[in-house]
Amino acid sequence: MTTAGDTVFFYVEAPTSAIVAVGKAMTPARATDRKWYEARVGKVRLLDSPISLAELRTMFPDWAWLRNANMFAYVSPDKAETLIERSKIKSQKLTRAQTVPWVLGLETPRRTHLWSEPQYGR
Amino acid sequence: MKGRLLILIGGSDEQNADYSLVHRRAQRGGTTNWSSLKDSHPGDRVLIYIQRPNSALIAKAAVLATAVKGKPGDYAYRAKIGRFELLPNRVGIETLRKRFPGWAWLRLPRGKAIVPARYADKLWKLVHQSRSNVQILISNSGYGQDLLAKLARTGNRKSGRRPS
């Protein structure tokens, strides 16, 4: 269960298909009337360079969750370390080997708008 | 002396909503008659395995009463189980296969099972390990993504929802 202080990455589903932000859980998870639990999140920071699903699959080829990333996931300590380090990388510092191209053909106007904001450098 | 360690199977919410049922029992207490092994008896410890897409051990419980034969058309045996608790460390099928390569049940985890004695302690320890404090939450690409951008700009706190 989520507890206050946990680090949370935000994965945005298709067509974005990428981890776009990182934040903190501000409260422990609590049950709702439905199947969901919920927690307050804060200290959200958009990643300077979002981590695409393709890049995640390259980083963690054996991670089953990445085959169908459609639900909440815990991140094992070793993967967490790698992800946290990767999330600090700024787009201009990425080497070719660290990047996987975005599928630009699938971009929607909404996504294009969001990703064209200055802080993303895209 | 510790009782046997059983694995009982549950369905995802898409199948029969056992997944949600386990969460409700863990949150609010209570017992339920669960499909079980014929010789389940009080004192047996239980790990609940939820089938695909979860494919993971998610909770523990205890057998509270001896199994009784199911009604025609129902499961063969059911036993009253209670004391549900979500596991600190959910363990997925792939991790289990890596940790217990010789355990045949893991090849096709469909049926209930008694955890072999040689694996029981190791498995019990594994599911009680402290979990990671890093998680990934899912957001949709419309409202959710806009909300993230707003949160990042304003620093406001919002409720994030996740299945647990």
Image (cartoon, coloured by chain):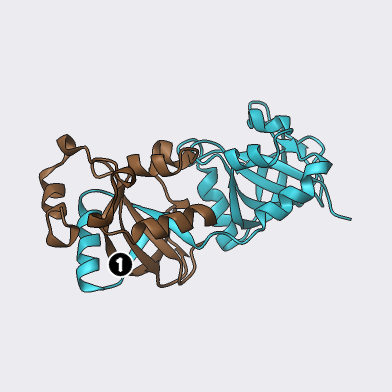
* Residue B60, horizontal then vertical, whole percent: 67, 52
Q: Quadrant of residue B92?
A: top right
Taking the view exactly as shown, the residue that stands out farthest to the right is: B1
Numbered disc 1: secondary structure? strand
From the viewer's perspective, is residue B16 above or below residue A79? above
Q: Nearer the viewer, residue A120 or A90?
A: A90
Q: How many marks?
A: 1
Q: Nearer the viewer, residue B64 or B117?
A: B117
Horizontal side, residue B33 vs residue A36: left or right: right
Horizontal side, residue B66 vs residue B155: left or right: right
Decide if residue B74 is in sight here. no
* Residue A85, horizontal then vertical, whole percent: 40, 59
Three-letter code, disc 1:
Val
* Residue B39, horizontal then vertical, whole percent: 82, 38
Tint of chain A: brown
Bin the neighbour count of mark 1 within 10 Å (Cα to Cα): few under 14, some 14-19, many 20 and up: many
From the viewer's perspective, is residue A55 above or below residue A79? above
Q: Residue at x 47, y 56 (%)?
A: A80
Residue at numbered disc 1? A44
* Residue A107, horizontal then vertical, whole percent: 16, 41
Q: Chain of mark 1?
A: A
Horizontal side, residue B126 vs residue B144: left or right: right
Tint of chain B: cyan
Q: Nearer the viewer, residue B64 or B2?
A: B2
Q: Residue at x 70, y 31 (%)?
A: B105
